[in-house]
Amino acid sequence: MAEKILVVDDSRLVTDIVKMRLEMLGYQVQLAHSGEEALACIADEVPDLMVLDVQMPGMDGYEVCRVLRDDPTLDDLRIIMLTSSDDKQAAFEAGVDDYLNKDVDLLNLPNRVKLVLEMD
């Protein structure tokens, strides 16, 4: 069964590009366009992995990540931060499993998704 990935970004262009690239590799992709929407999606069904932006209106990606990491039932959820922000330290402190810069790493996303999903 294909792994489920939730892509969270307020830019519909970014979510559409990421969705297209990941679906071509056989992943099931769901989209959310805010932190609050992402948490609602996870309450309905927990994905295997989340690709999460930092800068969003309302709840930012760091806050979403901290909320998820504070829930022990979500320990298996993998999170990749895909952002234009350069604050890797804040991302890892919030609890991400991997960090990619949209401007330079977007082409590497499918490979990193595969690696993060294989992590124990």
Image (tube, helix red, strand yellow):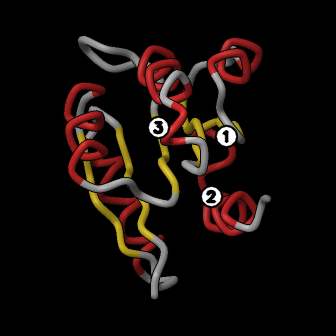
Q: Quadrant of residue 10?
A: top left
Q: What residue does disc 1 label?
A: 100
Residue situated in front as seen by the camera: 42 or 112: 42
Taking the image as shown, residue 17 lies to the left or right of residue 43, namely: right
* Disc with the residue nearer the chain's start (2 vs 1): 1
Q: Is residue 15 above or below residue 4?
A: above
Mark number, residue 52: 3
Q: Secondary structure at mark 1?
A: strand
Q: Secondary structure at mark 3?
A: strand
Q: Is residue 53 above or below residue 14?
A: above
Residue placed at 55% from the left, 38% from the top?
82
Residue placed at 60% from the left, 50% from the top?
76
Measure the alpha-carbon separation of dots 2 and 1.
8 Å
- Residue 4's x, y, as percent? 42, 67
Going by the numbered disc 2, the residue's amino acid type is Leu
Taking the image as shown, residue 49 lies to the left or right of residue 5, namely: right
Going by the numbered disc 1, the residue's amino acid type is Leu
Q: Categorize mark 2 by other alpha carbons within 10 Å: few (<14), some (14-19), many (20+).
A: many
Asked if disc 2 and disc 1 are in contact, CB closer than 8 Å, the reply is yes
Going by the numbered disc 3, the residue's amino acid type is Leu
In which quadrant of the rendered image does the C terminus lie?
A: bottom right
Measure the alpha-carbon separation of dots 2 and 3.
12 Å
Q: Categorize mark 1 by other alpha carbons within 10 Å: few (<14), some (14-19), many (20+).
A: many
> Which mark lies nearer to you, 1 or 3?
3
In which quadrant of the rendered image does the N terminus lie?
A: bottom left
Q: Secondary structure at mark 2?
A: helix
> Which mark lies nearer to you, 2 or 3?
3
Measure the alpha-carbon separation of dots 1 and 3.
10 Å
Q: Quadrant of residue 91?
A: top right
* Disc with the residue nearer the chain's start (2 vs 3): 3
Q: What residue does disc 2 label?
A: 109
* Residue situated furthest front in the rendering: 73
